[in-house]
Image (cartoon, rainbow, N blue to C red):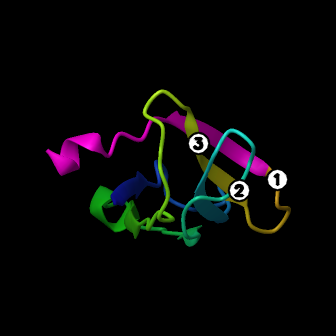
Amino acid sequence: MYLEFFQTEKVEDKRHPLTLSLYFADKHGERISNENLLIADSISTEPSARTFLEKFVFRTKRYDENEQYFLILEEDATQTIYEKIPFTIDLSSKFH
């Protein structure tokens, strides 16, 4: 699965670059996907230059469509969670 990320503002005087580790985890915090490193350091005024496409590969296992999973954005330097976005995973439609 591919997800697009957008750096909303260019890096300049008071806006510093940000490096994030991106991965999916279950409700227990167990990682269920690969990890991507996103470096938001663009100084461009062009939005297209501040757009990043990242590929996520999920572990082979059963995913419960009623269960909540999370996209974790973790600051690489401090390993603190920058953002935790809830997701549901429904793979059943691919098998019909």
Give the x, y percent position of residue 17.
64, 65
Q: Quadrant of residue 76?
A: bottom right
**Which kind of residue does numbered mark 2 sit on?**
Glu
Q: Nearer the viewer, residue 70 or 21?
A: 70
User: 3 and 31: which one is in front?
Assistant: 31
Quadrant into which the N terminus falls: bottom left
In the displayed structure, 92 sits above or below 4; it is above
As helix, strand or loop, the secondary structure at mark 3 comes to strand
- Disc 2 marks which residue? 74
User: Which residue is labeled 1 in the image?
Assistant: 80
User: What's the residue type where badge 1 is placed?
Assistant: Thr
84 inside magenta stretch: yes
Q: What residue is shown at x 75% (from left), y 43% (from top)?
A: 28
Q: Which residue is mark 3?
A: 70
Task: In this rendered view, identify the residue nearer to me: 3 or 89.
Answer: 89
- Mark 1 falls on what kind of element? loop
Within 10 Å of disc 1 (Cα), the crowding (few <14, some 14-19, many 20+) is: few
In-image side of 76 versus 2 (left or right)? right
Tag 1 near tag 2, CB within 8 Å: yes
Residue 73, how many percent across, how many down? Answer: 63, 52
Q: Is residue 89 magenta?
A: yes
How packed mark 3 is, by other alpha carbons closer than 10 Å (few <14, some 14-19, many 20 or more), is: many
Image coordinates for residue 85, horizontal then vertical, percent = 57, 37
- Work out which quarter of the rendered image holds the C terminus and state it: top left
Amino acid type, residue under disc 3 in the picture: Phe
Along the polypeptide, which appears first: circle 1 or circle 3? 3
Q: Which residues are magenta?
A: 81-96
The answer to whether residue 7 is left or right of residue 32 is left
